[in-house]
Amino acid sequence: HIGFALNLDWFNPCKNIQHSVGVLYLTILNLPHYLQFREENTFVIGIIPGPHEPDVNEIHQYIEPLVDEFLQLWAARKRSREKYLNIAYEYKNASSSIRNQILSEHGIHWTPLMQLSYMDIQRFIVIDLMHNLYL
């Protein structure tokens, strides 16, 4: 699985004029932090031309195409929590060589946190490192 952070940053391309341009971009959270924001690992998915920042309702038109793409990706491999746990337990009980095969095929491995009944690994929210840790 690949985890993405959806980012929206504004900048002023004009001097002495109040003007905002927005850039919607994705970064890959699975990479080490020093690689996440490199140009080759950043995917620009939209530019909001301005001259002002849109309100919450207007910004939806920029996000909806991305959501449509993610829905197609998600539909390709649906897993229930039970299916996810079954694969994780299979990983836990397997030999090293079989573990590598399971991880390669499913992208799932065991963690002791899965023993918690309320823990749903699939629904974790990943913290956006740049805005929550680095600033």
Image (spheres, rainbow, N blue to C red):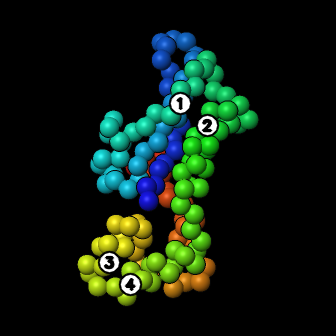
Earlier sequence position, callout 2 versus callout 1: 1
Mark 2 and mark 1 in contact? Answer it, CB < 8 Å. Answer: yes
Residue 10 showing in the rendered view? no
Q: Amino acid at mark 4?
A: Lys
Horizontal relation, residue 123 to residue 58: left or right: left
Q: Which mark is residue 92?
A: 4
Q: Amino acid at mark 2?
A: Pro
Q: Which residue is mark 2?
A: 65
Q: Residues within 10 Å of mark 2 (few under 14, many from 20)?
A: few
Q: Nearer the viewer, mark 1 or mark 3?
A: 3
Q: Which mark is residue 46?
A: 1
Q: Secondary structure at mark 1?
A: strand
Mark 3 and mark 2 in contact? Answer it, CB < 8 Å. Answer: no
Earlier sequence position, callout 3 versus callout 4: 4
Q: Which mark is residue 99?
A: 3
65 or 133: nearer the eye? 65
Rendered residue at 42%/83% (across/down)? 90
Q: Amino acid at mark 3?
A: Arg
